[in-house]
Image (spheres, rainbow, N blue to C red):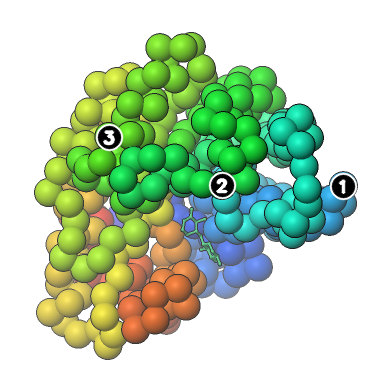
Amino acid sequence: DTPLRDLAAAKGKVIGTAVTGSKLTGTYGDIAGSQFSSLTPGNAMKWETVEPTQGSFNWAEADQIVAFAQAHNQQVRGHTLVWHSQNPSWLTNGTWTSAQLSSLLQNHISTEVGRYKGKITAWDVVNEPFNEDGTYRSTLWYNGLGANYIAQALTWAHAADPAAKLYINDYNVEGVNAKSTALYNLVKSLKAAGVPIDGVGLQAHLILGQVPATLQQNIQRFADLGVDVAITELDVRMALPADSTKLAQQKADFKSVMAACVAVTRCVNVTVWGFTDSDSWVDSTFPGYGAATPYDANYAPKPAYYGLSEAL
Ligand code: XIL
């Protein structure tokens, strides 16, 4: 079969996967390097990973993934700079004034984006800023700095790497709904204010048979605002055990997500959140669910793999 990355390239698209650095060897490394044109570190660039103790840094896994990507002519999506989750305990347990929080965040962004300047195609600068009803999520950042933390983070990231495409990324924003409309309105106001915002990431952690009917329409409305769109964390979870009926539905779901991206010029990247069922966050996060990726745990392509290839 023609590798997914070649099929995607022929349509002007990039196809990616989240990866775990320690696994990038053997069959896992062969598939990651040959089938995909973009890598996202699943955890390696998160704040708790890169600065577990204040002022003491661990870039080993992030460096390794960036080097692997360069050796395989792949893009890297940096993930993620500003989030409420997976922050180091020294940060979350600290007592900070607004001025201190602001300078901690600016330093974090300048340090990390600066380290990888020129090597990262796109950064998920801000991750998961919204609640389901479209209000801002109550986080360390929103509570300490107000909604302006988003514009500031984007501005600091742009200063550290002017060529990187800067994204806001969230989940349950795949279809047209209150949350995606809040994201839409935010992007519109950031653009009007001249804040550097290049794209939106739709995570797409989906449930079997529940691809939103308005996915393509939603991608198109962001494109029409003048930003790129990426499907950043695609997986389709099913109640275990898997069977042939569920796997066929999963194929249809992966195919329709890819087809929606292919249909919109400014949809630039579809990234799966782990390409194998042996490297997925689903099983531990959603008990009773799994089999959410395009390859089984033994690295055999599943029907979902052919759903992706048939849409390309
Ligand atoms: C997940 C990782 O895959 C897990 O290994 C980790 O334990 C928790 O985070 N949305 C995101 C990703 O933006 O960073 C999350 O990744 C999955 C949900």
Task: Say which residue label 3 marks.
Answer: 181
CA–CA distance in space, label 1 to label 3: 38 Å
CA–CA distance in space, label 3 to label 2: 20 Å
Task: Say which residue label 1 marks.
Answer: 55
Residue 262 at x, y percent in the picture: 22, 39
Residue 307 at x, y percent in the picture: 20, 60
Q: Is residue 254 left or right of residue 100?
A: left
Nearer to me, 143 or 160? 143
CA–CA distance in space, label 1 to label 2: 23 Å
Residue sitting at x 76%, y 30%: 99
Q: Splitting the image into 4 quarters, where does residue 134 fall?
A: top left
Residue sitting at x 35%, y 20%: 188
Residue sitting at x 59%, y 40%: 143
Contact between labelled residues 3 and 1, with CB atoms less than 8 Å apart: no
Q: Is residue 117 above or below residue 293?
A: above
Residue sitting at x 58%, y 56%: 85
Q: Is residue 41 left or right of residue 273?
A: right
